[in-house]
Image (cartoon, rainbow, N blue to C red):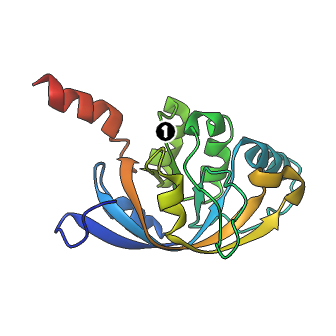
Amino acid sequence: MMEIGTANVKRVTAPFTREEVNALRCGDQILLNGVIYTGRDAAHKKMTAALEKGEELPFDLEGQVIYFVGPTPAPPGKVIGSAGPTTSGRMDAYSPKLIAQGLRGMIGKGLRSQEVIEAMKQYGAVYLGAIGGAGALLATRIKKSEIIAYPELGTEAVRRLEVEDFPVVVLIDSLGQNLYELGKERYKR
């Protein structure tokens, strides 16, 4: 987990305003609090299909954060099972449409397409990275979990999560600055 108490760790609360998103910069370490939603490729496909048909989504996207995760079943006495990020590229075909509807943040791991980055710049969104392989640890930062849509998708159902000091890093900010690119440049020097 991130070292708490250092000057470069920011505490932020979801949902986000555009101004809050615009203040976040590539490389910022974040302790995220508030309400976020889950969704992987199957849920994203259903949500974009609903938008194309003019149907309502399971939740209002304005200002929201979606965590790309398919958690394991909750063990007895726990809120949720292991909840590590999935590869974000699976959502690239759907993310620009959701960002255009007001989605302000996405949490996952791995690279994003240029189309997603352009949508983030145009509409004001950030891509946050969670620690891959640390799903059990990340689950301890999830205080409530409730399935709100598409229960037929099993682990990929859309959930409403309440998180407390959930550790993430800004991988791509609303200016399009990309830690995956900037990080490489730093080590080339």
Q: Nearer the viewer, residue 92 or 84?
A: 84
From the top left corner, tell me how far across and down residue 84 is, in percent. Answer: 55, 51
Q: Residue furthest front?
A: 76
From the top left corner, tell me how far across and down residue 47 is, in percent. Answer: 78, 51
Q: Which residue is at a point 84% across and 45% down the rendered structure image?
A: 49
Q: Which residue is at a point 78% across and 43% down the rendered structure image?
A: 42
Residue wearing tag 1: 118
Q: Which residue is at a point 49% across and 69% down the rendered structure image?
A: 141
Q: Quick one: quadrant of the C terminus? A: top left
Q: Residue furthest left?
A: 189
Q: Residue furthest top?
A: 188
From the top left corner, tell me how far across and down residue 124 is, in percent. Answer: 47, 55
Asked which quadrant contains residue 188, the reply is top left
Q: Which residue is at a point 45% across and 65% down the rendered structure image?
A: 18
Q: Nearer the viewer, residue 152 or 82?
A: 82
Q: Is residue 2 above or below residue 132?
A: below
From the top left corner, tell me how far across and down residue 80 is, in percent. Answer: 65, 66
Q: Quick one: quadrant of the N terminus? A: bottom left
Q: Amino acid at mark 1?
A: Glu
Q: Nearer the viewer, residue 18 or 6?
A: 6
Q: Number of callouts in the render?
A: 1
> Circle 1 sits in a helix, a strand or a loop, which is it?
helix
Q: Nearer the viewer, residue 171 or 51?
A: 171
Q: Is residue 188 above or below residue 141?
A: above
Q: Is residue 114 left or right of residue 183?
A: right
Q: Is residue 108 above or below residue 34?
A: above
